[in-house]
Amino acid sequence: MAVIVFYPLAVGFFQTFTNIDATNQGTRFKPPTWEFVGLQNYIDILTGESTKFYPVLIWTVIWTAVNVFFHYTIGLTLALALNQRFRGRTSYRMILLLPWAVPAYITAISWLFIFNGEYGLLNNILGAFGIPAVAWLSTWPWYYIMPIIVNVWLGIPFMMVVLLGGLQSIPGDLYEAAQMNGATARQSFWNITLPQLKSVSTTVILLGCIWTFNIFVVIFFITGGGPGGKTEILVTYTYNGFTLGQYAIAATYGVLIFSLLLVFSSVYRRMARES
Amino acid sequence: MKMSRRRSVLTHTILIIFAIWSLVPVVWTLLTSFKPESKIFTTEIKLIDDPSLKNYSDLLTRGDFVQWAFNSLFVSIVTTVFAVFLSATCAYAISRFRFRGRSTSMYIFLVAQMFPGVILLIPLFGIFTNLGLIDTPWALILSYATFAIPFCILMLKSFFDTIPYELEEAGRVDGLGVFGTFWRIVIPLSVPGLAVTAFFAFVTAWNEFLFARSFLTSKDALTLPVGMATFIDPFNQPWGLLTAGSVLITIPVMIVFFLAQRFLISGLSTGGVKG
């Protein structure tokens, strides 16, 4: 366990201080010729000199925030709806869980087909109302919006299930007491439901942020990072560096992503504990 | 509590909208998979058009798809066995014995959830190259077990915690050793927990894309996700094959998912997510 996780991590961390790439890493026939470059990789990236770190970072942050916002709000709405007693509840729950059961890359392929400019379902439906076809994945702002739609679709069931579990563990007498004191439904939502859900919410939002920040397949399949690299997020960008053989730069990106997440999660946890 | 009429209408409207949204890509993919190629590339919307199993027979007689399915199956099963065995023994030790570094190791397993896969990708690629494992299933099995094990340990530990220690003491009085109690008492009692863990490990391996794409090069060695991705070509997309493949890949996961979902949800709320 330690060997298989921590040894590679140590190697990766070590590589960020070198200029190792596909040409100088050495093979069985050729000795390696890479050198130490100290903090040069970090300096290059953080000053925005050799790569476009900041534009990618900004889009990654927007991507994460928008996705998690919709995951949480829609997930909570559905959980509240399902937490009532009515007929057909189980069937709704089964259908709403469906996106979770489909492998993420299959989801991406299905949506790619729906978004297709020439014969995709979306354009065909719009066409039936006389709206001209749109090339969804190469027109501003749709190439930003489409991957978000797909990822929101993917992430809702998890939030819904965990929040539903949270809602069911809130003791019913709290609501009864509120009702006796004349509280409206809205007041009991803000003063009972949300505070009671706090510990579950903070955990799922944190997990949601980490997962969305690191999700690879959605961007990779839907836009491929395009057009012109505009929808690249940090992980896909790192992966491109790796496929181009820029191992040291890609490893440095990896370390930066991990540090960002670590700082974010510790600040987040502290804030959640204080408030 | 009986719902008011207004509230009931609102609840059903919300649930129906999101249920449709969840169903559209899945159902559309399923319907498309039965259409002949000529009816797929059209701007008309027809749910069922000239249905046939041609896409499926084309896919299964191609040979490569069947080969990829075997590869995926092999990788997933070996990963599952490996991950369940290691995490069960490890989680049992953490759950039952007090030793130095016990709580630290639990924290590390949580932090391990934060690593973007890309960080490990680069150093692991180097290590597997040196070991000659690139383009073999073992590179994938080792790395998938790495992702799956921390989460499995967290889940199983919370599961083992719920098994009363008195049962083991009774076993020990009757002359069982440490391994005897583990094997004859703890394991039979934790079948649901082990089932969830196995499901999780299997699905992780079955769906993984990034590592498979990076570590496998020859066409015969590919797993299903990467194999499917080779169908996607910007100029000529064989949607008939893609949708039929999507359906075949999703069906087994979906069956297992709906069987496991009850355990999965209780496992999530007692174990992993609540920390």
Image: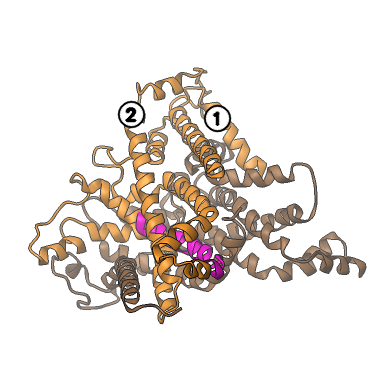
Chain colours: A orange, B brown
Residue name at image x 34 percent, y 66 percent: B22
Q: Secondary structure at mark 2?
A: loop
* Labels 1 and 2 share a subunit: yes
| Picture layout, residue B249 above or below residue B12 | above
Quadrant assignment for the N terminus of chain A: top right
| Amino acid type for the residue under numbered disc 2 | Lys
The residue lying furthest to the front in this view is: A181
Location of mark 1 (residue): A13
| Picture layout, residue A23 above or below residue B174 | above
* First reached walking from the N terminus: tag 1 or tag 2: 1
| Picture layout, residue A235 above or below residue B44 | above
Q: Nearer the viewer, mark 1 or mark 2?
A: 2
- What's the CA distance linking mark 1 and mark 2? 21 Å
Task: Point out residue A108 in the picture as x, y percentages from the top left corner.
Answer: 34, 56
Query: What main secondary structure does the magenta stretch of the protein show?
Result: helix
- Is residue B77 visible to us here? no
Location of mark 2 (residue): A52
Q: Which residues are magenta?
A: A152-174
- Label of residue B248 in the image: none
